[in-house]
Image: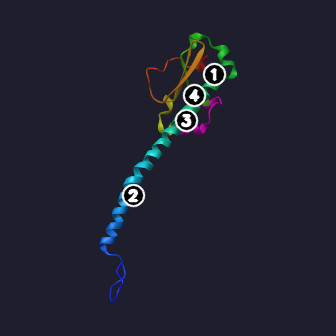
Amino acid sequence: MKIGDGMRKGFTLIELLGVLVILALLSAIIVPSVTKFITQAEVQVDDSKIKSVETSARNWLAGDNRLLKMDSSAFPCYVSVSTLVQDGFMDKELQQSLENNYDSSNLKVVIRHDDDKFSYKFYYEVSSEIPSNDCSNY
């Protein structure tokens, strides 16, 4: 900024360009970092949703003495997210959140029973790993 006898007050073009260069450099450094943190947060939210759905399936299987009604030939089988919500084992909000990203007819949890141990895996798309047995039919 030049101030003197008869000189105008203000910034020169070079000073303004210098500020713009500094701002561009700062944004080039900051934006990728912020984007990385946002992506990591989205992945953590998705992982949390998957664990919630799998826990809901675990609770659904344990509820209403379902395990006593099912023999080992029933496994592997699947339970749909809509069944978990309908039976009160999962929040409708979680279902809606999943349906915003995926086709609701494909949201299923596959339950396997091997060596007296149960495993739960969430699927959000058509897969050959999803058995044809619907656990809710037992």
Give the residue furthest to the left: 14
How is the rendered protein coloured? rainbow
Q: Is residue 12 visible?
A: yes
Residue type at numbered disc 1: Leu
Where is the C terminus found, in terms of image quarters?
Answer: top right
Tell me, yes or no, whether the two marked residues, 2 and 1, touch with CB atoms within 8 Å: no
Tell me the number on the disc at residue 54: 4
Callout 2: SS = helix
Question: What's the distance in space between the residues labelled 3 and 1, CA to CA?
Answer: 18 Å
Which class describes the residues within 10 Å of circle 1: few (<14), some (14-19), or many (20+)? many
| Residue for badge 3 | 49
Disc sitting over residue 61 in the figure = 1
Q: Nearer the viewer, mark 4 or mark 1?
A: 4
Residue 26 at what x, y percent from top left? 39, 58
First reached walking from the N terminus: tag 2 or tag 1 = 2
Q: Residue 15, position in %: x, y?
A: 33, 71
Single out the mark in the foreground, 2 or 1. Answer: 2
